[in-house]
Image: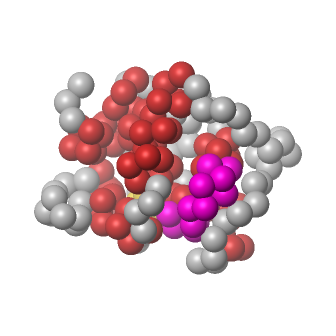
Amino acid sequence: MISPMYVANNMINRANAQDVTLTNLKLQKLMYILYAKFLHETGYSLFSDRFEAWKYGPVLTKVYDVFKIEGANPIVNLRPDNNGQIMIASETGDFGKCFDFVWGNYARKTARELVEITHGTNDVGNYETAWRITVTERGLGGFIKDEEIKNDGIKWFGAT
């Protein structure tokens, strides 16, 4: 498993290099979709932190807290992890494959479009996403279960 801040910093680094606007809301959704893709491809969690179901979709509270000072403004500066280190690296292996797929297919979408995907209200139609199940069963702020995220992966990426 890797650090969520490692993932966030890699996304910020890629966004800066490709002139992609990355807000905290958009970062959260991209991280969730990447988590779902990695879980779908490998059967393993990308990191040990758990997503919570917030009003606008899945959120990693610790990552949100680091970047909340930006408000709705673009995030351009990398931030240290809990150990005070700023880590980025070339994305390799399963992580790199999943990262490149998610970035290539979702990074140019708006935050609103990504919210619609995680809510299950995009052009595919209304369907039960892990976020929606969590809100219904455990309420806003509930932790989203990996088993439910796996089902999102099947809907979004196909059967394995």
Residue extending farthest to the bottom is: 72
Q: Is residue 160 above or below residue 35?
A: above
Q: Is residue 114 visible?
A: yes
Locate the C terminus and report the quarter of the image it occupies. top left
Percent across and percent down for residue 26 are 50, 63
Q: Residue at x 42, y 39 (%)?
A: 101
Q: Is residue 6 above or below residue 96?
A: below
Percent across and percent down for residue 41 are 36, 27
Q: Residue at x 63, y 71 (%)?
A: 74
Query: Is residue 20 left or right of 9 when viewed as pictured?
Result: left
**Viewer-nearest residue: 125 or 109:** 109
Q: Which residues are magenta?
A: 13-26
Percent across and percent down for residue 25 are 51, 67
Query: Is residue 125 left or right of 40 when viewed as pictured?
Result: left
Q: Is residue 23 above or below residue 78?
A: below
Query: Is residue 85 left or right of 13 when viewed as pictured?
Result: right
As for residue 90 lying within the magenta part, the answer is no
Locate the N terminus and report the quarter of the image it occupies. top right
Helix, strand or loop for the magenta stretch, by majority: helix
The image quadrant that residue 159 belongs to is top left
Q: Is residue 15 visible?
A: no
Residue extending farthest to the right is: 84
